[in-house]
Image (cartoon, coloured by chain):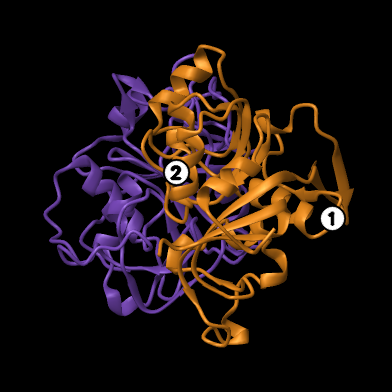
Chain colours: A orange, B purple
């Protein structure tokens, strides 16, 4: 399939029950077009790996509200009452992960590491049932890699070979998740000719990007 | 910088915390009272404020109509960036936090106990917002200050032992409320200062945890600058 596809083609690729990484921080840096289209398509039983549950109408919110999500893996759910309700009703399973651990678990998957050793979470509920490892006299929690079938990325610019840049704080999880999805789909704000993005300004090399959402003609 | 005539409890706390900040520090401010701290600092100090979402050098909210959703703080609110600011991804941002590069974090709290353990991320059965970046911040920052109102609904938030799930096993460095400055040490909680117009007896009466009181305890001096 071509690098450039429509939102509808992207949505058709993602089956019910898929594990999906969704970038963004309180909805900033989230590919909103893909989220809306997945919600409209009525996807079921998705596992969403995303920093936060944002609000009902931002970030992963529309997918939660539309009943598409079976499991949520992220660090913060405090300002999405819809997710809170569904969690208490048993409709959505929630795995809370400290934010720094979440991004490192994703990075570990994308970079071929067998996990990360972090002091974060030791002595808290987060450590329950997890192995600890001692290195040079200090104790760390062993956190496993976190993989996904798809990574949905929001970019600022994309060139014809899929090189990506991000804008300001909309960067957040994007470059990390772009390493960790089996299939990486980017939704850029603009598409530019090769060469417009200087090689050392590329944040995600196009070789990592499987598909790019076409701009409306 | 704000005028020193401060009566509001939240501003007393913010002002007192600001006195802990030294020039050129890299500082992370949590949501709520901690956010107010930056108002009490002179910009010439060259302090950089970091947010979990990757801004190093947060500025004030932009002028009306100039906000952009690609530049927000850790609460998702519009922000600006100061001259010299940089933007990093989330992995790098938490590398700064955990890696010993963050000089100070100021967070709100639900409870702090006699061992200096902070609980601030969930109330089981009532509200579970999640820890966000708090566990990494409390575990990794070089210095941790808890900035919070002393009591909630008449109940002391400084307790002998947290009955809420703790955020980290790390002992926080300082607790600042509108009534007291308290330093957790190996032997317990030392009362260092009282709030404006508050007596030592009042602090003791309003604090569930046992306080260690040595010598004369001064009142917070909110007129001084760092």
**Depicted A95 relative to depicted B186: above or below:** above
Give the distance between the C-alpha atoms of the residues marked 1 and 2, in whole angstroms. Answer: 28 Å
Residue marked by disc 1: A113
Image disc number at residue B167: none
Residue B202 rendering spot, x and y as whole percentages = 28, 28
Q: Earlier in the sequence, mark 1 or mark 2?
A: 2
* Quadrant (top left/top right/bottom left/bottom right) for the N terminus of chain B: bottom left
Secondary structure of residue under mark 1: loop
Q: Which one is in front, B56 or B206?
A: B56
- Visible residue check, residue A5: yes
* Quadrant (top left/top right/bottom left/bottom right) for the C terminus of chain B: bottom left
Crowding near the residue tagged with mark 2, few <14, some 14–19, many ≥20 C-alpha atoms within 10 Å: many
Q: Is residue B83 left or right of residue B28?
A: left
The chain containing the residue under callout 1 comes to A
Q: Is residue B22 left or right of residue B179?
A: right
User: Which of the two discs, 1 and 2, sits closer to the camera?
Assistant: 2
Q: Are marks 1 and 2 on the same chain?
A: yes
Q: Quadrant of residue A65?
A: top left
Secondary structure of residue under mark 2: loop
Crowding near the residue tagged with mark 1, few <14, some 14–19, many ≥20 C-alpha atoms within 10 Å: few
Q: Is residue A188 left or right of residue A131?
A: left
> Residue drawn at (57%, 21%), measured in percent from left and top?
A92
**Depicted A107 relative to depicted A93: above or below:** below
> Residue drawn at (64%, 75%), measured in percent from left and top?
A161
**Depicted A189 relative to depicted A131: above or below:** below
**Depicted A91 relative to depicted A34: above or below:** above
Residue marked by disc 2: A59
């Amino acid at each position: 399939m071509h690098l450039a596809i429509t939102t509808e083609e992207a949505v058709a690729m993602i089956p019910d029950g898929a594990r999906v990484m969704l970038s963004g921080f309180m909805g900033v840096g989230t590919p909103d077009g893909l989220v809306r289209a997945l919600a409209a398509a009525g996807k079921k039983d998705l596992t969403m790996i995303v920093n936060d549950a944002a609000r009902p109408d931002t970030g992963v919110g529309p997918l939660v509200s539309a009943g598409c999500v079976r499991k949520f893996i992220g660090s913060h759910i405090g300002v999405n009452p819809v997710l809170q309700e569904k969690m208490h009703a048993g409709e959505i399973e929630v795995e809370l992960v400290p934010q720094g651990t979440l991004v490192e678990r994703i990075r570990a998957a994308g970079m071929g590491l067998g996990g990360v050793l972090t002091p974060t979470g030791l002595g808290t509920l987060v450590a329950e049932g997890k192995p600890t490892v001692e290195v040079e006299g200090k104790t760390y929690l062993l956190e496993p890699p976190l993989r996904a079938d798809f990574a949905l990325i929001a970019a600022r610019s994309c060139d014809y070979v899929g090189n990506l840049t991000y804008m300001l704080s909309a960067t957040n999880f994007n470059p990390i998740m772009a390493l960790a999805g089996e299939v990486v789909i980017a939704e850029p704000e603009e598409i530019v000719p090769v060469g417009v993005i200087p090689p050392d300004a590329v944040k995600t090399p196009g070789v990592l990007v499987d598909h790019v959402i076409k701009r409306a003609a | 910088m704000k005028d020193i005539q401060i009566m509001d409890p939240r501003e007393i706390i913010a002002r007192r915390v600001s006195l802990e900040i030294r020039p050129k520090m890299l500082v992370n401010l949590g949501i709520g009272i901690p956010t107010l701290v930056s108002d009490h600092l002179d910009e010439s100090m060259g302090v950089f404020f970091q947010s979990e979402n990757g801004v190093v050098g947060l500025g004030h909210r932009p002028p009306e109509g100039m906000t952009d959703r690609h530049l927000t703080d850790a609460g998702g609110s519009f922000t600006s960036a100061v001259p010299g600011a940089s933007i990093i991804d989330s992995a790098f941002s938490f590398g700064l936090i955990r890696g010993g590069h963050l000089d100070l974090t100021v967070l709100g709290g639900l409870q702090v106990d006699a061992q200096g353990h902070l609980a601030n991320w969930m109330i089981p059965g009532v509200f579970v917002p999640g820890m966000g970046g708090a566990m990494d911040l409390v575990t990794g920052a070089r210095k941790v200050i808890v900035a919070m109102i002393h009591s909630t609904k008449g109940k002391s938030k400084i307790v002998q032992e947290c009955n809420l799930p703790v955020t980290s096993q790390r002992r926080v460095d300082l607790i600042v409320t509108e009534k007291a400055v308290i330093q957790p040490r190996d032997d317990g909680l030392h009362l260092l200062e009282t709030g404006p117009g508050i007596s030592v007896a009042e602090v003791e009466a309003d604090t569930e945890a046992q306080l260690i009181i040595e010598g004369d305890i001064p009142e917070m001096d909110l007129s001084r600058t760092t």
